[in-house]
Amino acid sequence: MQSLFSFIVKPKNERYDNIKKIGNKNLILNSEISDHRYVSRTGIVLAVPKENNTKIKVNDEVIVHHNVFRRWYNQKGKEVNTKSFYKENKYLVYPDQIFLYKRNNKWYAPDEYCFVKPIISNNILSNNKEVPYRGIIKYISKNLDDINIGDLVGFRPNSEYEFVVDGERLYRVLTKFITIKYERQGNEKEYNPSWAKGS
């Protein structure tokens, strides 16, 4: 089965990622279905669209929009699926709802997106632990001239969206919002809060 314009994706594990293992016990972090922060964003591709020239293939692991697997309450208070729900643990996902894909244990970014790792702030006069709107390229597509993985870049304010990928807190940024490439000074350190490592 193939959709004309959408990928068919299933959750990699569960629809929600709201349980953390501490020792031999499970801690439930959240019991609200409407909180997007605890919706699983990791899926497995079951089928690719017929009318889309994509690098993503069947069986690739993907990072998707938080609303894909989410459930919510409608105006009558009834628990319902989002419009992405297709049937029996299968979801229709548009190409712009896939932000990363993994093949052979390596992550790749589609052409529109890149992922930036925040860096530690050395400003002793600021309470910010990271430098705002600046970071190191972690994953990128090949459509940005002269910018590569490991480069220090700046991005437009409020263009970033937080993800945790393989225990690393990253910002997803549209490639068109990367505004500048900085020269590395050699003292930039990546910032990864301890809570992200346990995700």
Image: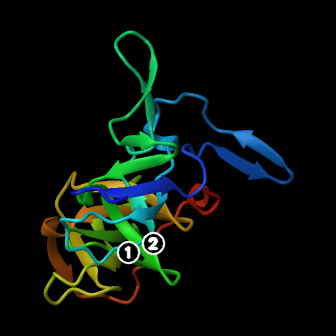
Spot the residue most to the top: 76
The residue labelled by disc 1 is 57
Q: Residue 8: image x %, image y %?
A: 38, 56
Residue under the point 56% across and 43% down: 16
Q: Quadrant of the N terminus?
A: bottom left
The residue labelled by disc 2 is 60
Asked which secondary structure carries label 1, the reply is loop
Residue 122, can we see it?
no
**38 or 48, which lies in front?**
48
How far apart are the two marked residues, 2 and 1, measured between alpha carbons?
Answer: 6 Å
What's the image's color scheme? rainbow
Left or right for 52, reference 195: left
Residue under the point 28% across and 80% down: 152
Spot the residue most to the front: 1
Crowd rating for badge 1 (residues with CA inside 10 Å; few <14, some 14–19, many 20+): some
Q: Residue 187: image x %, image y %?
A: 41, 84
